[in-house]
Image (cartoon, helix red, strand yellow):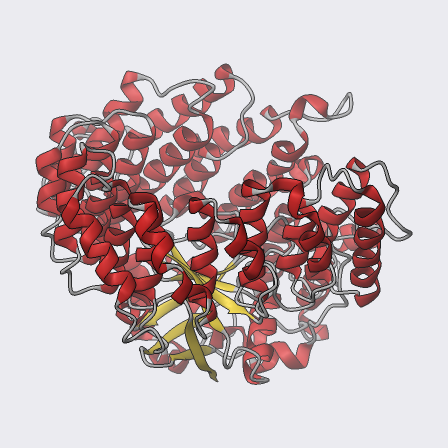
Amino acid sequence: MPGCVPSCLRRRAAVLLFVRRAFGHSCIFAFAHVLCACLTITLLPTPARAQPVAGVSRLAVLLAEDRRAATAADLATLRAGTRSRDPLTARIAIRALGRLERPALISDLVPALGSVLPESRAEAANAIAQAAQGWARSGEASAPAGTPGLASALSPLTARLDAEQEASVRAAICESIGRLPYRSADQVALAEAALIDQAGRSDTVTDRLGVAEGFEALVRVSRTLRPPSPRALDIVKKLFGSTPAAATGQISSVGDPARRPRLEADPMRDARVRRLALETLIAADAIDDEVVARALADPDPQVRRLGMRAASASGRGSAVLTRGLEDAVPMVRIEALQGMRERAGEQACGAALAALADPETQVVLVALDQLARCGSWTEAVTRLEGTVNDLSSAGLPRGWHRAAHAVVALASAAPDRAAAALGQFTGSSVWQLRMYAARAATLLGDRDRLEILAKDPDDNVVEAAIDGLAKVSGHASDALYVAALSRSGYQAIRAAALALDGSPDRGAAVPALKAALQRLVAEGHANSLDTRTALVATLSKLGSSPPARPPRASAAPAASILNAEDLRRLVAPRARITIAGVGTFELALFPSEAPVTVLQFVDLAASGYYGGLTFHRVVPNFVVQGGSPGANEYVGHPGQMRDEVGLWPHVRGAVGISTRGRDTGDAQIFIDLVDNPRLDHQYTVFGQVLNGIEVIDRILEGDVIERIEILP
């Protein structure tokens, strides 16, 4: 890359080694994401003597993208950028055109598939697939007459795949072919044929990874149009089962061994191939005993975790799940427990009871949740009741979780006993216990307690209580919903607006709904969009027109924060995050991939914004999410962030921005606890955990972000 010097490379050698081992694209992507010190020069406007003929600077391209190319001039800037003689300018412009998700721009991207630089060709393949996502929103069939169809994306990708000599580009093309928004079985068949053909020519681990990514995306997105053929499934099974042999120097059974030499092996990336292949087989309902047995014996814990899911989804492997409960890695034990949930009561309840002794709190909480189905087991009810009544640690920041999960489970397993214990929760000084009490009261149908909690000082408790009242008492509690419309928490207002849908008391509901909407519109916070939308929808259903300036379908673009000075200071940034009472972990940030996101995160962290906020969402074997001032999905930073989806995958430890629709990020962050390929190209990845992943695994709901330090 331009601007890199040996000292730069030496400083980041350890990080580069981590990235190259863990991920499957070419070295240029690792450099672009991690060796960001090299971008001190390359992200800034090019000096006049080095400007390309078109005179388009990198900063101009980034600014045009940041505005979502709202004008013809911005679009012209991006188009000119793709033809720049400066390689990084061209790559940034290619990526930017794709991120607009406008299928009409595919014709502007196709020429870049013939670039002399492999990184630009790979970026072009990804950008074509991203641009095609515009069809997923509007439908190819609804495009105006004369608009190019999906063939305008698939045909150039398959043609380039046949001619491509660089493995990293072939991998990017395979994934792009797999994730196009197909509309017919014939289109899916063409895509599958291209992947099958490439599988027969897979000489490297990068090729295998690309084929695996392509099949995983194709089967996940398009299996309802056309299930995978026997030939495709055979290849996926070989990808899952052949890589251990490849690691010992043997020839893979994928393709014709006579056509190529021995396969390159990389244990960490081969593990990703196996994970993706197993995800594909699960989605295709193509699990057999051999696949389950291989998964159980795999050295990679994520493969074993998926093996538990495979055993459960296929209806076989009770012994596999039992063995998984004894695995050394918590993620495998959690998946085995969740798989047991679908088994007969005796087996599932026995497993959950045994798991209450697990040393990992997350495993115990999953076990408590599953005891909700064990009301016929005296021992299960006794253990739940004992946990509910043991509030000795409930006042501690990390001490309330077991009782909270237990009271909700007990409400299902033994309603009478839960009702007797609920009072100590509704009066607790810990708001999370009151919130869980509202969830338990919903299961119990306890209107009186829900109405008390609907007046709670904490908006999260109010939201849970109103959601419950809407189910338990319906419009008999409309007066409480109307009162909640005057609260400040968006989550409580939204819940109240939804509960008032169909209210028979229009005289009370409509003025309150209009007043809440006017207040939020005047407030001008972009992240209240979901709440404003709910208010408008309920008003419309009640036959009332909303007041002036109703909410738009998406937030207005904010003024760009990009400038040369800020970009210059982002030299290989890292972030150190300290969680109170848990520990510290570090992230590598990716300003080359997500410059606006990184700038906003860095600025907010430096201002102390995140200090004292919590991780309010913890989903085992999925993600942890935090950074909300209201400890809630609907309360974030007042502004909104545009998406910057790219090539970096949602692997374990990837750090993304939570959204509730396109370009609706509000500075809430999430961290992938496992590989989540279904999130790829949907949510911005702006960093990757470098160290301390074990700290992240221990995060519990409500854990406090003590501080975030930016380390240049």
Q: Tell me if residue 266 can be seen.
A: no
Residue found at the very far top of the displayed protein:
186
Residue visible at 61% across and 76% down in the picture: 567
Q: Nearer the viewer, residue 612 or 247?
A: 612
Q: Is residue 625 above or below residue 155?
A: below
Q: Position of residue 569 (x, y in %)?
A: 57, 82
Residue visible at 15% across and 60% down in the picture: 358
Q: Position of residue 532 (x, y in %)?
A: 74, 53
Q: Is residue 272 above or below residue 133?
A: below
Q: Tell me if residue 18 can be seen.
A: yes
Q: Is residue 569 left or right of residue 476?
A: left
Residue found at the very far right of the displayed protein:
548
Q: Is residue 73 left or right of residue 681?
A: right
Q: Classify residue 512 by image quadrant.
A: bottom right
- Figure disc tally: 0
Q: Is residue 122 left or right of residue 586?
A: right
Q: Nearer the viewer, residue 371 or 106?
A: 371
Q: Position of residue 29 (x, y in %)?
A: 43, 58
Residue visible at 57% across and 76% down in the picture: 41
Q: Nearer the viewer, residue 371 or 9?
A: 371
Q: Position of residue 10 (x, y in %)?
A: 34, 79
